[in-house]
Amino acid sequence: MRDDEIIERVASRVLRSLEPRAHTGSHEEFARLTREAGRADDASCMWCRGRGECHRRRPVTTRRILDAGACRVSARYPAGAVENELAPCIDHTLLRPEATYEQVARLCGEASQHQFASVCLNPVHVAAAAEMLAGSGVAVCTVVGFPLGATTTEVKVTETRQAIDNGASEIDMVIHVGALKSGDFASVRDDIERVADACGREALLKVIIEAALLTDEEKVQACAIAKMAAADFVKTSTGFGPGGATIADVALMRRTVGEALGVKAAGGIRDRETAERMIQAGADRIGASASIQILRESGPGTP
């Protein structure tokens, strides 16, 4: 059986085990209205909370559109710099518990200088980062239920609301891994949906599946549920688990979610070649603490 057939079968089982989503009808109506000559637009645009920020939130997809023949893309002010480089794909990350105020300030300065997609920090640093990055075009991303995913949904929702109030516009949440491995898909979906509701139109939601703890079937299940629960991205790893991002996991996650969601590769990405291979496998975002080193390195085959 081909990989695509396995993904379709596993995802279908997960979806059948959960009641239909309330927006299924609108999804079908959108497809009907936008279908032409057998082709339909990506229905995820219906619920996108980042309108006017495709160049920053989905830079790889934006480049694909330009390569296909578009001469312009729109961007919401302030757009920030748009580079033909890796920088707009990178979440410049500092999640170490011992991170100092000076290190946080340096991270924000580097992100503004290089126009990374975001800085990804622990919640305690969000307010300071938002103040430092105001008007820079760089998003403030923080983590929820991190790193285990084993806090209650109510705590995750509270963390999310507080982070948004403090200036975060991107939320990376960890799923309840134990519930997924127990086959309790409804609890996993409810956990994600409630955080997605808390994000509303104010923040992008990335769902960390901690792939190193999962079988391939469970990775497909997690991604299918995240897609159903209206997440914006799926993400490989916390960087604190037993393993980080792999090419195989990124490719599997991309095949599972299609173009409806972004894919973020994180954990163990320390050089440009690895980052570029992750993007080639289907990643839209790279989470890295070695972001400056990645940008400084020459690409494969270049002097």
Image (cartoon, rainbow, N blue to C red):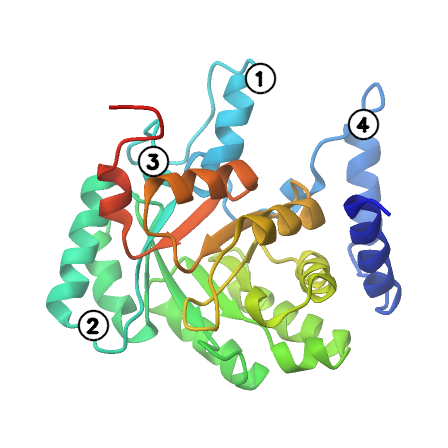
Quadrant for the C terminus, please: top left
Of marks 1 and 4, the one in the foreground: 1
Q: Identify the disc placed on residue 99.
A: 2
Q: Identify the disc placed on residue 35.
A: 4
* Residue located beneath label 1 in the image: 68
Element type at mark 3: loop
- Residue 20 seen in the figure: no
Element type at mark 2: loop
Of marks 3 and 1, the one in the foreground: 1
Q: Residue at x 32, y 46 (%)?
A: 271
Instruction: Out of 144 and 203, give the one closest to the viewer.
Output: 144
Kind of residue sitting beneath label 4:
Arg
Other-residue count near label 1 (Cα within 10 Å), few / some / many at <14 / 14–19 / ≥20: few
Q: Find residue 291 and report its horizontal and vertical position in percent.
A: 28, 49
N-terminal-most mark, 3 or 4:
4
N-terminal-most mark, 1 or 4:
4
Gap in angstroms between the C-alphas marked 1 and 4? 19 Å
15 up-or-down from 92: above or below: below
Element type at mark 4: loop
* Residue located beneath label 3 in the image: 79
